[in-house]
Image: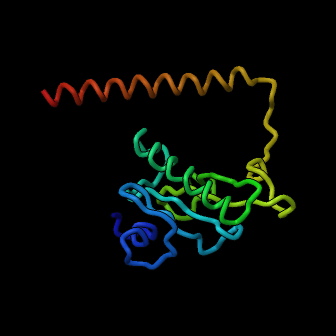
């Protein structure tokens, strides 16, 4: 638990919440400022400030719980669909620096919009191959870094 983290305090029971689901890895509760009825937040019990700080197993556990909760929320509120997302970083609208997935049930004609309504900058599309290559390059660099770290950890363990 991070001492001043609002969600860590909710997860520990120090601050009350309307619990929806919990297991050894995640804690899901109703958003106190819901975008729609049933708006649920799914957070890892372990504190992560940023989604990119999470390891593959933590991400898998978080999103499996989000999948289960989304199915239940959609049925509970006769939703026609749902928005499922993470605001990662203050610039993206993350208000609490503890990773959490928003599950927002939606109904046809509810006045809401899709994910592209968050930001729509209409960037230049003539350089899509350059943009894709820039991302692929960073993915390769990250994979090499992870391989180096894994090898160093194996050597330390010997």
Quadrant of the image for the N terminus?
A: bottom left
Q: Quadrant of residue 74?
A: bottom right
Residue located at (16% from left, 30% from top): 156
Q: Nearer the viewer, residue 38 or 32?
A: 38
For the C terminus, the quadrant is top left
Viewer-closest of 31 and 158: 31
Residue at 73%, 49% (x, y): give it.
Answer: 115
Taking the image as drawn, is residue 90 in sight? no
Residue 90 pos. (x, y %): 58, 57
- In the displayed structure, 38 sits above or below 62; it is below
Residue drawn at x 65%, y 68% as measured from the top left: 38
User: Horizontal and vertical percent for residue 124?
Assistant: 80, 32
Please indicate whether residue 126 sits to the left or right of residue 103 in the image: right
Q: Position of residue 136 (x, y in %)?
A: 58, 23
| Residue 141 pos. (x, y %) | 46, 24
* Colour scheme of the picture: rainbow
Residue at 59% in and 70% down? 31
Q: Please tell me whether residue 17 is drawn above or below residue 158 in the rendered image.
A: below
Residue 79 visible in the current orientation: yes
Picture layout, residue 38 above or below residue 64: below
Specify whether 154 is left or right of 79. left
- Report the side of 127 relative to 12 (left or right): right
- The one of 135 and 23 positioned closer to us in this rendering: 23
């Amino acid at each position: 638990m991070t001492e001043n983290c609002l969600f860590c305090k909710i997860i520990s029971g120090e601050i009350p919440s309307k619990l929806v689901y919990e297991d050894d890895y995640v804690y899901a509760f109703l958003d106190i400022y819901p975008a729609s009825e049933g708006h649920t937040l799914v957070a890892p019990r372990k504190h992560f400030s940023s989604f990119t700080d999470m390891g593959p197993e933590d991400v898998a556990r978080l999103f499996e719980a989000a999948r289960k909760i989304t199915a239940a929320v959609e049925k509970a509120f006769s939703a026609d669909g749902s928005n499922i997302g993470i605001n990662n970083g203050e610039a993206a609208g993350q208000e609490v620096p503890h990773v959490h997935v928003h599950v927002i049930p939606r109904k046809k004609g509810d006045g809401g919009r899709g994910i592209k309504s968050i930001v729509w900058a209409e960037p230049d599309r003539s350089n899509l191959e350059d943009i894709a290559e820039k991302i692929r390059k960073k993915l390769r660099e990250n994979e090499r870094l992870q391989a180096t770290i894994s090898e160093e950890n194996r050597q330390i363990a010997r």
